[in-house]
Image: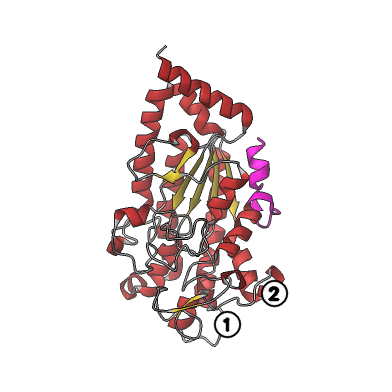
Amino acid sequence: MKLWRWLVLSYFFLVGDASKVPALFVFGDSTVDTGNLKQRSSLSLLMTNRLPYGRDFVPPGPTGRASNGKLSTDFLAEFLELPSPANGFEEQTSGIFRGRNFAAGGSGYLNGTGALFRTIPLSTQLDAFEKLVKSTAQSLGTKAASELLAKSLFVVSTGNNDMFDYIYNIRTRFDYDPESYNKLVLSKALPQLERLYTLGARKMVVLSVGPLGCTPAVLTLYDSTGECMRAVNDQVASFNSALKASLASLASKLPALHAMYGNAYDLLLDAVEQPSKYGFKYGNVACCGLGRFGGSSACSNLTNVCSSADEHVFWDLVHPTQEMYRLVSDSLVSGPPSMASPLNISQLIAL
C-alpha cells in the first residue's frame, strides 16, 4: 500500500475512534452558506462580501455569511468538535475528510430559484458532492469511503427562496395556487434528498423553511403594522408539514437512513412573537437596514446598523442574527421532539 494512502486511512480510523462524527456536509441556501455564492458571483443584493456583514465574526470581517457572525452550522461544527466545513466550490483539498459546505445563497429545491444571482441550486450542489464522493473513494477505497459517509452528518437547509419566489413573483402566483406550488417544490425536494442517500448519506438533518411572513422584508412588502403575515406563514407551515411527513416516509423505506426534521419555523416564530423569552429586545426589526422594520432595503454600510445585534432576532431584512442562529443550533442538538423529530442530533450521532 502506498504511504500516502496508509496515512489517509490511519487518519480516518483515528478520527473514527475519537469522534462519532468524522465529517459534516452542508447543503442549502444563505441560511447555511459560508461563502460559496461570494466565490461564485460578484452580484449579491445582500452585500455579504462587505461589512457590516461579519462584523461580529472572529476575526471580524465579511466571510460570505448572511449574518453579523456565525451561522447555525458553525455552532453545530463546534458541538461536533469539527472545524466549520470548507466551502465545496473552492479549489482546495485540505480538510476534505472533515466535510464540505456546498450551500449557496439564493438557491432552493427548484433549479430556477435564484437564477438571477447565478446561484448554485441544490441539484448542482449534489453534483459537486458526487464528484467529491468519487474522489474520496479513489483515495480511501470504496469501503472506507462508504464508512466515513455513513458516520458523517449531513445538513440540508433550503426551500426559503422557493417560497420567497412565490411571494415576490407575480408570474409564479398566476401559474400556481399555494397548495399546488407547495406540491411542486416538494416533488423536486424528495428526489434530491433520496439522491443524497444514494451518494452515501445515512444521518441526515433537514431543516424547515422559516416563518417568512415575519421577516422584516415581508412586513414591509405588505405594509404590516407589526403582525406576521398569516397567509404567507400558513403556506410555509403547510409546506413544512408535508416535508416532515415525507421525510419520515423516506426514512421508513430507505435502509439504514436516519432522517431528522429540524423545526426552525416554530422556534423563530416564537422568538419573533416573544423576543424577551429568548433574551432579545426586537423580534421583527432588523439590526441592519432601513424603514420601520429594517426591511425597506438591503443591509449595507450605507444603511442603519444597530450597536448590539444580540438584541435582535433578525440581522437584515430576511436573515437571523448570530445569536438566533445559536439558538437554532441548540434546538437541533438537544431540542425536544417538537423541535427535532423523531430525534435530535445528540441522539442521532449516538446511533
Q: Residue 276 has which mark?
A: 2
Query: Magenta stretch?
Result: 333-351
Residue 345 sits above or below residue 182 on the image = above
Give the structural element (helix, strand or loop) at label 1: loop
Of all residues, the one furthest to the front in this rendering is 59
Instruction: Check disc 1 and give the amino acid type.
Output: Glu
Q: Is residue 139 visible?
A: yes
Residue drawn at the location 61% of the way across and 58% of the way down: 326
Q: Residue 177 has which mark?
A: none
Front-lying residue, 207 or 102 = 102
Q: What is the x, y in percent for residue 271?
A: 64, 70
Q: What is the x, y in percent for residue 227?
A: 57, 82
Inspect the magenta stretch and tell me whether residue 90 lies in it: no
Please give the residue where the numbered disc 1 appears in the rendered image.
227
Residue drawn at the location 62% of the way across and 27% of the way down: 17
Reading the chain from its start, which is encountered first: label 1 or label 2? 1
Give the structural element (helix, strand or loop) at label 2: helix
Instruction: Check disc 2 and give the amino acid type.
Output: Ser
Residue 287 appears left or right of 311 = left
Q: What is the x, y in percent for residue 19?
A: 62, 33
Residue 185 appears left or right of 79 = left
Residue drawn at the location 56% of the way across and 84% of the way down: 226
The image quadrant that residue 311 belongs to is: bottom right
Front-lying residue, 20 or 196 = 20
Query: The N terminus is located in which quarter?
Result: top left
